[in-house]
Image: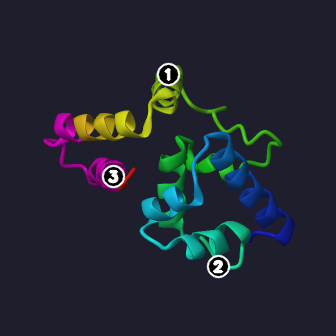
Amino acid sequence: MLTAKTTKTTLERLKKIRIGKRLSQEHMARGLAVDRTTYIRKEHGSIPITTDEWLKIALLLGEEPAYFFSSNQDGSSLINVEEPERALLRLYRTLTPEEQQDMANSLRLMLKGIKRKKVKEAVELLTNINL
């Protein structure tokens, strides 16, 4: 269970990275399919952020979902990630939102023959975010 301090730290990380990437609250709200005031209330902790919304937020910001919940001060969460995965994540983070969407669409096309549920869900999540 998250404590008030943990929740505050998590939401501070969210706001810090959003501002660092120069993304507006409106942009985030559109990505979550909510209005701006609802997003503001979520970012301030007045309304809880669902697991699905955290996944979308992570993709919108080019971060791993674990980044927001890491116990490390800097939010680092790549300790157990292999180098090829790190390289893909670094690449994704360097792309513009439009390029990220292009990458997601390309992955969807490349992986469309794979029937495993987790792969299909991950690709679906990537391609359904409106950047």
Residue displayed at 72% across by 60% down? 11
Residue displayed at 82% across by 70% down? 3
Residue 123 relative to residue 87: left or right? left
Residue 69 makes an appearance in the image: no
- The residue labelled by disc 1 is 87
CA–CA distance between discs 2 and 3?
Answer: 28 Å
Question: Along the polypeptide, which appears first: circle 2 or circle 1?
Answer: 2
Would you identify the image quadrant in which residue 45 lies?
Answer: bottom right
- The magenta-colored residue range is 108-128
Q: Would you place residue 89 above or below residue 108 in this image? A: above
Figure quadrant of the N terminus: bottom right
Amino acid bearing label 2:
Ile
Q: Residue furthest bottom?
A: 46
Q: Which mark is residue 71?
A: none
In the rendered image, residue 117, in percent from the top left (x then y), is placed at 27, 55
Foreground mark, 2 or 3? 2
Specify whether residue 119 is painted magenta.
Answer: yes
Q: Which class describes the residues within 10 Å of circle 3: few (<14), some (14-19), or many (20+)?
A: few
- Do labels 3 and 1 touch, CB within 8 Å? no
User: What kind of element bears circle 3?
Assistant: helix
Question: Along the polypeptide, which appears first: circle 2 or circle 3?
Answer: 2
Amino acid bearing label 1:
Ala
Q: Main secondary structure of the magenta part?
A: helix
**Near-viewer residue (44 or 25):** 25
- The residue labelled by disc 3 is 118
Foreground mark, 2 or 1? 2
Q: Which mark is residue 47?
A: 2
Residue 2 relative to residue 106: left or right? right
**Near-viewer residue (115 or 3):** 3
CA–CA distance between discs 2 and 1?
Answer: 35 Å
In the rendered image, residue 76, in percent from the top left (x then y), is placed at 71, 37
